[in-house]
Image (tube, helix red, strand yellow):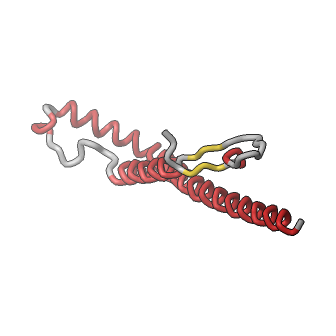
Amino acid sequence: MCTGRRTGAGSQVGVVSMSDLKADTKRIRECSRALQRIYDSFTGRANPAKDFSADELGNKLIVDAFDEFADNWKIHRKDLAEKIRKLGVITWDAAKNYDAIDSELARALREQDARTASARGAK
């Protein structure tokens, strides 16, 4: 179920609409916050086995495998983290812009309804 704001002239009775767009801005913002958490995780800890000993992980081979993974991961982590950060900004801005457009459309429709009612009353 879409719990966000409804955008589109199709919600007006008697108005023909080319499209009826629904955007769940609450969910889009949740996505943005989740992406921020992922970004924080990516930039916070490169090696998931850091600070664990061979005794804790089972043996030295596991520690070495995690170290190798961490070395390779460092190479690509910053680029991936930046892409995740940008996607988070894009989703946040999308929700903000959907709400702004929806508010502007509603305002314009109210003004048009008021002008129409005023013109009918003047006849």
In which quadrant will I find the C terminus?
A: bottom right
Q: Could you tell me which residue is drawn at 81 percent across and 67 percent down?
A: 118
Q: Measured from the top left, where is residue 107 in percent x and y?
A: 69, 64
Residue 117 at least partly seen? yes
The image shows residue 45, relative to residue 59, as above or below, that is: below
Is 19 situated left or right of 51 in this image? right
Is 28 situated left or right of 99 in this image? left
Residue 35 vs residue 45, the one in the foreground: 35
Is 101 situated left or right of 91 in this image? right
- Quadrant in the rendering for residue 40: bottom left
Residue 32 vs residue 113, the one in the foreground: 113
The image shows residue 61, relative to residue 95, as above or below, that is: above
Q: Measured from the top left, where is residue 37 in percent x and y?
A: 38, 52
Residue 11 vs residue 28, the one in the foreground: 11
Residue sitting farthest toward the left: 55
Q: Could you tell me which residue is drawn at 82 percent across and 66 percent down?
A: 121
The image shows residue 3, relative to residue 107, as above or below, that is: above
Q: Could you tell me which residue is drawn at 28 percent across and 37 percent down?
A: 66
Q: Measured from the top left, where is residue 96 in percent x and y?
A: 58, 59
- Quadrant in the rendering for residue 70: top left
Residue 82 at least partly seen? no
Q: Could you tell me which residue is drawn at 59 percent across and 53 percent down?
A: 94
Q: How many marks?
A: 0
Q: Measured from the top left, where is residue 23 in percent x and y?
A: 58, 46
Is 64 situated left or right of 119 in this image? left
